[in-house]
């Protein structure tokens, strides 16, 4: 195990990392995988794949049928902390018609089960590493090994893409600007923020606008999203 983790840390590209992961999980019977995250944007969380190791024909089908919108594995990962198998996720919910189509399509490709590792980080960050294979009982030690491996791979993928050191604002935000923007992100109005901070609504607007300009954001929602990506939330 130590040797695999060492190669993960030394991976110099996402392609190299994908190959390391592919070989490691193949030993446990998994034949496909993906590592990604849902990143905050103005219009809501946006899926971002660090790497995928699915057949091209599956990726095309997944996109054409918009399976990402009905992927119950993603939905389960959002509400779980511990890793889980696809069959465990399936048993925990009543599948919709579109979710059943996704399950049937995956089974047609030979993936009768899989293993998913949710990754929840600061400021609402949500990542996911998932792998597909044949249905079988996973011993506790195997689950633990795959869990640790997935976390290491995801962490290395973030580092390789630069998301662990996202570009910060053009100028440092003041303590007041940051506090006001955090309250905006929590859903409060300028009036509510003013009352909580003991300042005027005009001053609140000035602080929020100042933060928005420093973050190169077009709107308040965009500023909040940039705050999260920059690790300031």
Image: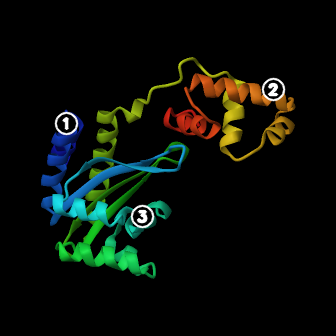
Mark 3–mark 1 distance (CA, rounded to whole Å):
32 Å
Count residues near mark 1 (Cα–Cα under 10 Å), then give few for <14, some for 14-19, many for 20+.
some
* 199 left or right, relative to 111: right
Disc nearer the start of the sequence (3/1): 1
Numbered label attached to residue 203: 2
Count residues near mark 3 (Cα–Cα under 10 Å), then give few for <14, some for 14-19, many for 20+.
few
* 70 left or right, relative to 23: right
| Helix, strand or loop under label 3 | helix
Numbered label attached to residue 72: none
| Helix, strand or loop under label 2 | helix
Reply above or below: 169 against 185.
above
Q: Position of residue 140 (x, y in %)?
A: 29, 68
Q: Could you tell me if residue 136 is visible in this image?
A: no
The residue carrying mark 1 is: 11
| Helix, strand or loop under label 1 | loop
User: Residue drawn 32% across and 72% down?
Assistant: 86
User: Residue drawn 30% across and 60% down?
Assistant: 63
Q: Position of residue 15 (x, y in %)?
A: 17, 42
The residue carrying mark 3 is: 69
Foreground of the two, 149 or 16: 16
Q: Nearer the viewer, mark 3 or mark 1?
A: 3
């Amino acid at each position: 195990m130590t040797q695999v983790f060492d190669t993960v840390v030394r991976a110099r590209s996402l392609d190299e990392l994908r190959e390391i992961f592919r070989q490691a999980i193949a030993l446990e019977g998994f034949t496909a995988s993906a590592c990604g995250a849902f990143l905050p944007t103005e219009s809501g969380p946006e899926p971002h794949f660090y790497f995928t190791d699915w057949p091209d024909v599956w990726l095309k089908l997944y996109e054409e049928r918009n399976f990402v919108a009905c992927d119950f594995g993603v939905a389960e990962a959002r509400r779980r902390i511990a890793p889980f198998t696809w069959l465990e996720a399936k048993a925990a919910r009543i599948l919709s018609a579109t979710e059943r189509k996704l399950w049937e399509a995956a089974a047609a490709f030979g993936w009768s089960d899989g293993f998913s590792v949710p990754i929840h980080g600061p400021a609402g960050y949500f990542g996911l590493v998932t792998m597909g294979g044949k249905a079988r009982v996973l011993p506790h030690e195997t689950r633990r090994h795959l869990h640790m491996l997935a976390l290491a791979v995801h962490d290395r993928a973030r580092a390789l893409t630069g998301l662990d050191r996202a570009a910060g604002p053009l100028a440092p935000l003041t303590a007041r600007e940051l506090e006001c923007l955090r309250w905006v992100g929590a859903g409060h109005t300028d009036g509510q923020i003013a009352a909580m901070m003991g300042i005027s609504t005009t001053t609140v607007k000035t602080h929020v606008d100042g933060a928005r300009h420093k973050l190169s954001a077009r709107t308040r929602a965009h500023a909040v999203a940039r705050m999260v990506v920059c690790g300031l939330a």
